Amino acid sequence: MKKIIITVLLTALLLVSCGGGSDNSDPQKQSYNTKQLVEKITADYSLSGGTYFSSFSEVYGEYLDSDMLLSLYGDMGEVPDMEAVEEYCVYVDGTDPNLQKELGVFKTKDGTDTELFLSFMRSRIAAMLENAKNYPSVDTEPLKNAEFFVEGNYVVYVVVKSDAKDISEFIKDNLD
């Protein structure tokens, strides 16, 4: 009888120490800044050869100022004030002029009009789509399937051939 009780107690102890077969623990959410998030995505989704522009850089040409915004995005009307952005990272891959790949994650300061940033990103992609009409070899699928969203103080756009929805969900799941 003692052996049965000891066996039952050991089995119960083993089950409790292993979680009892239930999954009560949620994996902790990874905390990324915008640059780490974009770098993780480009690594995980095999996006390479592009250029990063980040608020974490102090090297001229590796961060966006008003001149860089205009040269990168062209004249899209009202240009968002980069002073209203707390941090950002943009990845632009122009290695294949016939296949556009880029993504941007902007964390705006509290009270900033995120809709202006969102409109600016949408205008950029719309202009690229319009321009592609003049170049039949350009694959417009990434532009047509671009993902845009505002999540709290974040404004995000994703332009890739495939996985745009997956990348967008990953970003949403990993914003603070």
Image (cartoon, rainbow, N blue to C red):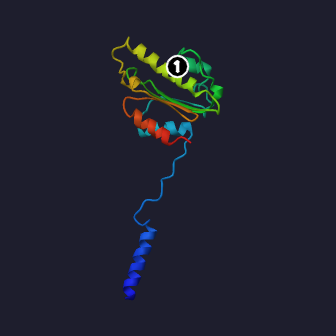
Q: Nearer the viewer, residue 38 or 166?
A: 166
User: Residue lying furthest top in this view?
Assistant: 134
Rendering quarter of residue 89: top right
Asked if residue 23 is positioned above or below residue 118 in the image, the reply reads: below
Q: Quadrant of the N terminus?
A: bottom left
Q: Whole-percent x and y of residue 129?
A: 41, 17
- Disc 1 marks a residue whose amino acid type is Tyr
- Residue sitting at 63 percent across and 29 percent down? 112
Q: Is residue 139 left or right of residue 156?
A: left
Q: Whole-percent x and y of residue 33?
A: 57, 40
Q: Which residue is mark 1?
A: 73
**Dot 1 crowding, Cα within 10 Å, few <14, some 14–19, many 20+:** some
Asked if residue 141 is positioned above or below residue 21 in the image, the reply reads: above
Q: Is residue 107 left or right of residue 16?
A: right
Q: Is residue 113 left or right of residue 91?
A: right
Q: Whole-percent x and y of residue 137?
A: 33, 17
- Residue sitting at 42 percent across and 79 percent down? 9
- Residue sitting at 51 percent across and 48 percent down? 29
Q: Whole-percent x and y of residue 105?
A: 53, 32
